[in-house]
Image (cartoon, helix red, strand yellow):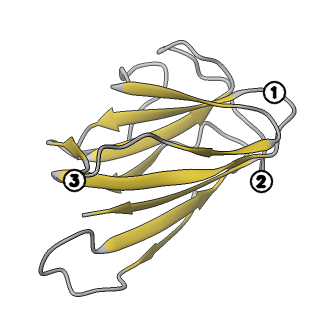
Amino acid sequence: SNQMITLNPQPAGGGFSAAGKLRSLASTNALTIKGSSAMLASMQGFNLAATNRFLKLYNKVSTPVPGTDTPIAIITLPPNQSFKVDIPAMGWRFPLGLGIAITGGISDSDVTAIGADEVVVNWVYA
């Protein structure tokens, strides 16, 4: 299973109230962050691999299926450096749910697994 930790640093009464992280496994790292309507506030991390990795975001209630489901966004994670996803100040809305995957190829249908501990992604959402 993916190594995800979710924190709830504030009451869920408003604002962005949850945070989490994923440390990559040797897989496509498909993961549901929230299985219902979500608002993504921030997403950042680092790629320790020597080549690009591709963070794919899905608007989906259930866990994304890389190679079958179509991501709504693909973010290139350059090798050996940190990254920050450009998200508007009001957040990025995912009406159905928020899921991610990280693959070795850029295409929507790519299923190339990445290595364990190559990529870490941190996020804040509501």
State the SS at label 3: strand
**What's under tag 1, amino acid-wise?**
Thr
Q: Where residue 20 sits in the image (x, y, percent)?
A: 47, 67
Mark 1 lies on residue: 51
Label 2 vs 1, first from the N-terminus: 1
Q: Where residue 83 sits in the image (x, y, percent)?
A: 62, 44
Residue at (30%, 44%) from the top-left corner?
88
Residue at (20%, 44%) from the top-left corner?
93
Q: Quadrant of the N terminus?
A: bottom right
Mark 2 lies on residue: 117
Which quarter of the figure has residue 73? top left
State the SS at label 1: loop
- Asked if the residue at tag 1 contacts the one at tag 2, i.e. Cβ–Cβ closer than 8 Å, the answer is no
Q: Local crowd at mark 3 within 10 Å, few (<14), some, or many (≥20)? A: many
**What's under tag 2, amino acid-wise?**
Asp
Specify the farthest residue to the front.
89
Residue at (40%, 35%) from the top-left corner?
57
Residue at (21%, 53%) from the top-left corner?
38
Q: Where residue 62 sits in the image (x, y, percent)?
A: 29, 44
Q: Is residue 35 visible?
A: no
Q: Is residue 22 visible?
A: yes
Label 3 vs 1, first from the N-terminus: 3
Which quarter of the figure has residue 95? top left
Mark 3 lies on residue: 38
Give how far apart the Cα atoms at labels 2 and 1 are: 14 Å
Q: Quadrant of the C terminus?
A: bottom left
